Image (cartoon, grey):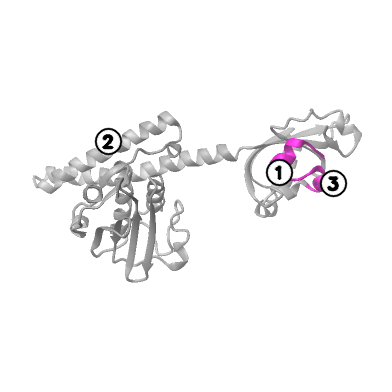
Amino acid sequence: MSTTGNGSWQSSWPHEVYAVGIIGLDRNGVVRQWNRGAELIKGYTAEEVLGTSFERFYREVDRELGLPELLLRTAEREDHVENSGWRVRADGSLFWADVVIMARRGADGEVDGYMKIVRDESAEHAAAEDHRAFLEAMAHDLVSPLASLRWTLEGMEAGTVTGQQIAQVEASVEHLLTMVDDLRTHVKNSFVDQLVLPLQDYNLRDGVAVAVNVVGHGEALRRVEIIEPTSVVAQAHPPTLIRALANLLDNALRYSNGPVQVEVARDPVPTVLVRDTGRGIDPADLAAIFEPRRRGRFAVEGDGGSGLGLSSARRLLQRQGGRVDLRSELGVGTEATVLLRPAVGT
């Protein structure tokens, strides 16, 4: 049975539904009813919340903006209001709530309370965010191979196509085809980040060569120095690995004017290092630099950066059991270290 503040509320509210939280409020937003579903979602017992303001369920920033009061006034004016956003559990953790607040009116037509229905949609929100991030990263990663193709086509129009340019066209087209295939898989399976990538033993030297051809063109290509490696084989998903390396190379070329070194090593696991001689990353930015659209304080308006390259590279490497670390020194440059799984049997 629901716990209520007074008997008159008991007869007019629905029976408990544990899949959702059903909360009765008086006209001032004080909690008068609290069902089992609300307890499960928010973590408070009825004894803890009855007689207290429903504002406790909102983040401090939302309370300061007056969101709780705004929702009640909107429901009073329009009979109901819908809202989705972060809410606070009893332990201080956040969850993504889908909320409907409906006004309850007395015989005189005046609002004497509200019924609030809450659903925890944290999983759905996280899946939607993954979907958005995948599409955003895909759009970002398409730019480099398309730019390489455009540069080659301009050379063809001028009658100056070289063997290197032809190799770049082949690499860019192959890279685009694998990305299209990844997009098809995403559409088929809804959320590609939930899939387990098929890994294979792969020579990292081959991946570096393709990534350089995809990203480097013109003056940028002449700045890339591949340190001739011994053969290093890792467990990887080649198309996804190439996308990650292309993002790291693109960042290094974009934010530096000097040489960019790419080295393959085994130290002690299969490793790819991308070093630039640029301005570096402010130490205060390093902790959050992998967050989507997070650009460092040294970013310059109009430099073409979007803040997606590093976040995309990290996600792509994590999906194949790898990771990327950054080390940077102001005025000296930045080194990205990609660590991958050893090949089977090594």
At 79% from the left edge and 48% from the top edge, which residue is drawn? 53
**Is label 2 or label 1 in front?**
1
Q: Position of residue 329 (x, y in %)?
A: 36, 70
Closer to the chain start, of discs 2 and 1, is 1
Outermost residue toward the bottom in this view? 331
Q: Position of residue 225 (x, y in %)?
A: 20, 60
- The residue under label 3 is 51
**Given the image, on which type of amino acid does mark 2 rest?**
Leu
Closer to the chain start, of discs 3 and 2, is 3
Task: Say if mark 3 contacts mark 2, CB within 8 Å.
Answer: no
**Is label 3 or label 1 in front?**
1
Q: Which residue range is magenta in the image?
A: 33-53
- The residue under label 2 is 177
**Given the image, on which type of amino acid does mark 1 rest?**
Lys
At 88% from the left edge and 31% from the top edge, which residue is drawn? 108
Does residue 293 appear left or right of residue 1 in this picture? left
Q: Does the image show residue 326?
A: yes
Q: Position of residue 67 (x, y in %)?
A: 69, 47
Q: CA distance from mark 3 to mark 1?
A: 16 Å
In terms of depth relative to the viewer, which is nearer, 334 or 318? 318
Closer to the chain start, of discs 3 and 1, is 1
Q: Is 120 covered by the magenta stretch?
A: no
Query: Could you tell me which quadrant the N terminus lies in?
Result: top right
Q: CA distance from mark 3 to mark 2?
A: 61 Å
**Given the image, on which type of amino acid does mark 3 rest?**
Gly
> What kind of element bears circle 1?
helix
- The residue under label 1 is 42
Q: Position of residue 245 (x, y in %)?
A: 30, 51
Crowding around mark 3 (Cα neighbors within 10 Å: few <14, some 14 to 19, many 20+) is some
Crowding around mark 2 (Cα neighbors within 10 Å: few <14, some 14 to 19, many 20+) is few
